[in-house]
Amino acid sequence: MKIASLLIVLACVLAPVCQAQFRSMDGDYQAFKVNRSNAPQGNPAVALQDYQQDSARQLISLVKDAAEMIRNMGEAAFDDFRKPGSHWREGEKYVFVLDPEGTMLVHADTAMVGKNQLELTDVNGKPILRGLMAAATSNPDKPQGWFHYEWPVPGGLLPRWKSSYVQLVKAPSGKSYVVGSGMYNDHMERAFVADMVKSAVQEIEQRGKAAFERFYDPTGPYKVKDAYVFVLDSAGVELVNPAFRNLESRNLMDLKDTKGKPLVKEMFNAVAASDTAWVEYMWPKPGESVSTQKTTYVHKAKLGDSWVLVGSGVYLADAPKDTTATKTVTATELKSFVNNAAAELQKRGDKAFPDFRKKGSKWFQGDTYLFVWTLDGKRVFHAADPTMEGKQVNGTKDAIGRPYGKMFLETVKSQQGEGWVHYMFPEPGDIFPAWKSSYVKRVTFPSGKQYLVSSGIYNMQMGKAFIEDVVNRAASLVQAQGKEAFGQLRDKNGPFYFMDTYVFVESPDGTELVNPAQPSLEGKNLLEEKDVKGIAFVREYINAAMSKGSAWVDYYWYKPGENKPTQKHTYVRKVQHGGETYIVGSGYYEAEKAMATKD
């Protein structure tokens, strides 16, 4: 760079009146970087070296650079931020700027610029602008922070998890702005979790127990992907658990991980030595049969005259997994097991019950056993726990409020008379709920009376059998009721939505009609939506369903809460009701088939 130009740049840093000259120079960002090394940097909440991923470190540096330009150049810096292909706006990455009232001043989507965006929400109802501004302004000692939400990539329709870093900055004019940027190809970071827990501690110490309600709010800052804030009192009693309300008021001090580690005791021992600590233990991810290392940040918080332990856990990228999965029967084996039991009951009725109770027999091995209900919801047989017999259970709900009793009965009363039901239920001898998949079947006893017979598997992997079952049942419903069935398909506590799996409905032209996971997509045409390899997968599976009646189609997409594209298998069926044609489908992500990506 020429010496004369450098002198102009140095002068501009000190005198904003020559900002026009600064902008007119070639390579103005590079010139700015020469001078930035001696500029004030603020007080970052977390040092860059505390982040695992290059993408997070680069994003923070980008935002800090942008903030420093505003601090020195003022509003004139906005023109540089708007330049496509520049350091500030490149591919999916772009810098945005907000004023204190929530008006968008700089953004990659020009339709948003110049408008107040305070009411903007993501697909889950999270108030995006309010969350971003709060992250930078709620704590005077920390004028920067993270906010996590779901948002489409520029030019796209399908939302992905986005983590945005924002910083409050004052321009030479005296006006304050919130500047930030976000990343889609993100990993959960220890720093994200620590940031969330520290904010929760601050709320508890300021507001006491009144702060607890904030931790349950799915649109707030304390539930991110599969991470959430929990609170235990000093004796180990769970006070707050947004994911599993059934654990609240229970003493968890003796809770052990899958390797026998007393993880709650370890948390308390750790904060006894220091007010904050990281604790690692082995725990299965929802729907997985192998344990993965979970990293949890815990922090003491003063609550009245006592104290509580506040924490949140996260499965980090590339966290080690157990080398072997717990041996379990497959979906096909369990279905055959229930069918064989149904045949036995059809011949012998309740005279088969004594054989079903014998542990170690073909009817009762480990956690695999049978139970029988009447079709009005009375449990008449339970091999593992006879004390549960004789109770009316048609109104029973699981740990997250799913009415599994009702779903059992609706499944066996359907035209098929059998199918899968998925719900959260503790394994025998445990208090922590795990996903359980039960196969239920209607059977007629020799007396002529009909019953429900079933057995279940914990942490069963999603597979083609499950998906075909749920799509076929949804298709039958749509075929019989048409659009009147859509409300049942949208019910997140119903049988068509579980784990990362849900049923969707589209018209043959690609218009999304039902999407309980992302309702904002309903009414939009997705026909030309492409996966990460450029395949127009919506067009592909619609064409396959229209020509064949039903089909499996594979493509790569982002599993909720994960940064790497994973192979997804989707099953679709063509359904007709009256004069209308519908495409009904659902899919699952293939375990261990994530695409290799660069961070």
Image (cartoon, rainbow, N blue to C red):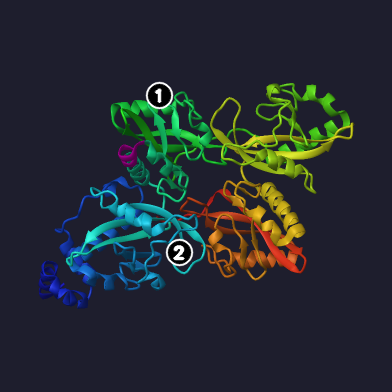
Above or below, comparing residue 385 to residue 174 in the picture: above
Residue 206: say if magenta: yes
Q: Can residue 183 be seen in this view?
A: no
Image location of residue 480, percent across then percent down: 77, 58
Tell which of 375 and 446 is nearer to you: 375
Dot 2 falls on a residue whose secondary structure is loop
- Bounds of the magenta span? 202-208
- Main structural element of the magenta stretch: helix, strand or loop? helix
Question: Which class describes the residues within 10 Å of circle 2: few (<14), some (14-19), or many (20+)?
Answer: some
Tell which of 363 and 349 is nearer to you: 349
- From the image, tell me which residue sits under label 2: 153
Specify the label residue 235 is tagged with: 1
Tell which of 578 and 456 is nearer to you: 578
Image location of residue 514, percent across then percent down: 62, 60
Dot 1 falls on a residue whose secondary structure is loop
For badge 2, the amino acid type reads Val
Residue 347: say if magenta: no
For the N terminus, the image quarter is bottom left
The quarter holding residue 30 reads bottom left
The quarter holding residue 362 reads top right
Q: In this view, does 468 lie to the left or right of 139?
A: right
Question: Which class describes the residues within 10 Å of circle 1: few (<14), some (14-19), or many (20+)?
Answer: few
For badge 1, the amino acid type reads Ala
Q: Is residue 450 left or right of residue 523?
A: right
| In contact (CB < 8 Å): disc 1 and disc 2 | no
